[in-house]
Image: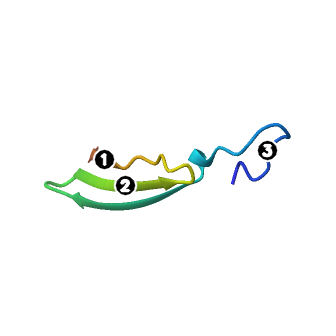
Amino acid sequence: DTQNRVPVGFSRDLAQDANFKTLGVEVKPIPNIVVKTDYQWVTNGAGTGRNQFNVNLGYAF
């Protein structure tokens, strides 16, 4: 926790106290190629977490 202690006069940024849950899948349509997708549920102490959907393409050479 990088904000375990903060200097006097400052307060912790609760938006940085986040939890991530990720569910994803990968597919290899042909050798050396992978397509990955995942969804992330993001929560934080400030209640401003934003969920996100990710798509990635990978190539092994």
Indicate the secondary structure of the residue bearing disc 3.
loop
Amino acid identity at mark 1: Asn
Q: Amino acid at mark 2?
A: Gln
The residue at 30%/60% (across/down) is 24
Of tags 1 and 3, the one toward the viewer is: 3
**Percent position of residue 49, x then y:** 46, 48
Q: Amino acid at mark 3?
A: Val
| Label of residue 40 in the image | 2
Mark toward the viewer: 2 or 1: 2
Q: Nearer the viewer, residue 47 or 52?
A: 47
Q: Quadrant of residue 12?
A: top right
Camera sees residue 58: yes
Q: CA distance from mark 2 to mark 1?
A: 8 Å
Lower position in the chain sequence, tag 1 or tag 3: 3
Question: Circle 3: is it few (<14), some (14-19), or many (20+) Cα within 10 Å?
Answer: few
Residue underneath mark 1: 54
Residue indicated by mark 3:
6
Q: Residue furthest top?
A: 9
Work out which residue is located at the far right of the displayed protein and give it: 8
State the separation of the CA atoms marked 2 and 3: 29 Å
Which residue occupies 65% across, 43% down?
A: 13
Q: Residues within 10 Å of mark 1 (few under 14, many from 20)?
A: few
**What is the x, y in percent for residue 20?**
46, 58
